[in-house]
Amino acid sequence: MKSILLFTVLLVSVNVLFSSQEFNNYQGVYFPAKQYIAESREHPEIAVNLNAQFLIEKMTIFSKTDSTKREKFIYDTDWFMTSEIMEISRNGVWENYIRTIYTNDDKGYRLVSESSKWLDGKWVGSERYTYEYDRFGNRVPTLYEIWDSTKWVNSMKFIYTFDTSGYFTSETDQNWINGEWVNITQWTFTNDSKGNQLTALQKNWDSTQWVNFSLYTNTLDNDGHRLSYIRVIWQNGEWVNFRRFLYTYDNNWNPLTFTRQIWDKDQWVDTWRYEDTFNEKGKILTETYQEYKDSIWADISRFVFTYDTDGNMILGQSQKYQDNQWVDSDGLISFYDGLKNNYSLMAYRVEADYMEVNAVKERAGTDGSTGDYSVFPNPASDNISIYFHNEDGLQLRDGDHLVICNSLGIEIKQLDEKELSGRSTVNISTVEFPPGIYFCTMNTGTNKITTSFVIMR
């Protein structure tokens, strides 16, 4: 692991959208304790996360059914990701395989993601995503195109809406057919006051109107932890039970089991489950897939994860249970890096290397009256700590203050010089902060230093 000093980083927010796809392929996906109604799909348009300390540099992917591959990640001078290049080993020689190039704006929002394949000694277009945003940084229309050998051709479009709090309220998917956009699927979401999704209604387009298809209903405890969700389907003009998922947790709200049931003969029947174990830092160590057979849970496959001392996943393994022992087997190894980016790779072994990045902000002035500061953790949940990089604490003047605003510019909290002077760390409860993007600004006379953080639950 190599260390890189990062100067003057403009921190941008990470927005996460949740799409209510059925859990047909849950293997390897770790669900956090505070879970939204539907399977999470990471928002792909942010090039770098807030206060990133470690950036993934490369991965090596080992497969039983395919050649070994490795993937390298490239960043610009502001540490926004600009490209990913995957290579494949053929006869002991690394060759180009797949490349994705990202175009970002000066705030780090991803504008274009363009993928190519290496064919006959050159890169040939494959697929492209183009993103747009509203004034709050939420992704709105997203265009998906494919390459037809001479030009980019429309394929799909995804349209998203959000309420005034920035909570995800709908998604409409369209296909490009015969020169026009045709509706395919529509999702409508309801949320509680903290942004937890309560229901997800899926409708399909039948050429003239939207028709009910599935309804997902989430059950949460008072702190927003998911306890269960039920999927019902629309049949003969009424909602009919179809599937149910149940969650259990340890004392630290790490998810221990995720159980799938089907509705059969007027009752819920167990079919399969995932059973997880964690280390003392809340990092998942194993995830075991089991099927319910002859009234017992039988081991089928599992994922095993290893971390470095900084908590980065450096080794992911996929195994199946065979002849009373665990043996390597290809599976969908899925993990999150320190940036909350998700990587899902079909392999029996994935090795990852990281770069360390130390974020250093610009100083407010030559007198060093404020110095640098950082917000940790980021993203956060119920508390943040503002750390001022000044051994003697802050030396402020009358009128200096720190203010926290939401994404609409509404002031949420303010601390004056009496509350800040001489302090090196300030702890702030964010329990009452709704999930979303927040901006923290230190005002010292004519100088301002602004950074941002995200509340996620």
Image (tube, helix red, strand yellow):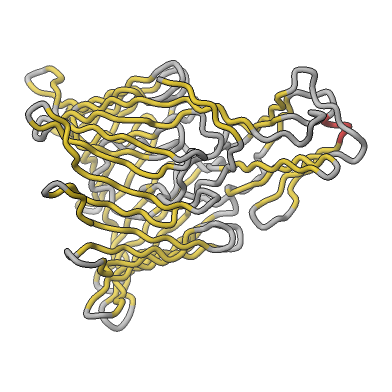
In terms of depth relative to the viewer, which is nearer, 390 or 252? 390
Q: Is residue 225 left or right of residue 211?
A: right
Q: Residue furthest front?
A: 121
In terms of depth relative to the viewer, which is nearer, 183 or 292? 183
Q: Residue furthest right?
A: 398
Where residue 381 sits in the image (x, y, percent)?
58, 37
- Identify the residue shown where x is 62% and y is 30%: 360
Report the label total.
0
Where residue 97 sits in the image (x, y, percent)?
19, 42
- Identify the residue shown where x is 34% and y is 59%: 129
Q: Is residue 254 left or right of residue 233?
A: right
In the picture, the quarter occupied by the N terminus is: top left
Where is 85 relative to 159, above or below?
A: above
- Identify the residue shown where x is 10% and y is 35%: 66
Where residue 127 sits in the image (x, y, percent)?
26, 57
Q: Residue furthest bottom?
A: 208
- Identify the residue shown where x is 35% and y is 41%: 246
Where is 263 relative to 327, above or below?
A: below
Where is 144 relative to 308, above or below?
A: below
Where residue 215 sits in the image (x, y, percent)?
36, 61
The answer to which image quadrant residue 328 occupies is top left
